[in-house]
């Protein structure tokens, strides 16, 4: 998943160092996220959003981490969420039920 952390941060004049200080993270961690070397989990994604907004950026989780298409979105979301051991089948059924184009 490509993110727009660096683009939004720079658009609002926020330095990487300021973002790192606000998050309490090492600069290498944010640099890895910005370069798409690592992908932040949902908790970290929300933390990045909150830090950027508190530093003056106007953005949403969706603008910071844009999704591509319905199927790509589900695949990305599934990659971010842990599946409890033994619950794979029930999780797959839930994903199928809420997939774009699924019948109600």
Image: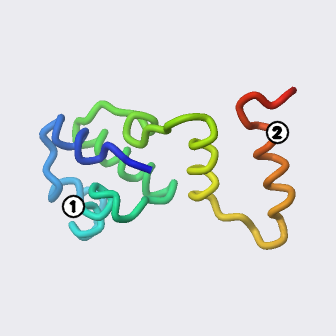
- Residue at coordinates 37% horizontally, 45% vertically from top-left? 50
| Residue of label 2 | 97
- Residue at coordinates 31% horizontally, 48% vertically from top-left? 51
- Residue at coordinates 24% horizontally, 62% vertically from top-left? 31
The label nearer to you, 1 versus 2, is 2
Q: Which mark is residue 67?
A: none
| Image coords of residue 15 (percent x, y) | 13, 50
Question: What SS does tag 1 mark?
Answer: helix
Above or below, 32 against 59 in this view is below
| Image coords of residue 56 (percent x, y) | 23, 36
Question: What SS does tag 2 mark?
Answer: helix
Above or below, 69 against 3 in this view is above
| Image coords of residue 29 (percent x, y) | 29, 67
Q: Residues within 10 Å of mark 2 (few under 14, many from 20)?
A: few
Q: Residues within 10 Å of mark 1 (few under 14, many from 20)?
A: few
| Image coords of residue 55 (percent x, y) | 23, 42
Which image quadrant for residue 24?
Answer: bottom left
| Residue of label 1 | 21
């Amino acid at each position: 998943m490509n993110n727009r952390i660096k683009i939004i941060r720079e658009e609002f004049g926020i330095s990487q160092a300021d973002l790192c200080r606000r998050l309490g993270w090492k600069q290498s961690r944010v640099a890895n996220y910005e370069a798409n070397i690592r992908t932040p989990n949902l908790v970290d994604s929300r933390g990045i959003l909150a830090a950027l907004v508190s530093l003056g950026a106007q953005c949403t989780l969706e603008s910071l981490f844009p999704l591509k298409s319905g199927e790509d979105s589900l695949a990305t979301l599934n990659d971010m969420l842990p599946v409890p051991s033994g619950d794979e089948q029930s999780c797959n059924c839930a994903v199928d039920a809420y997939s774009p184009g699924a019948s109600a």
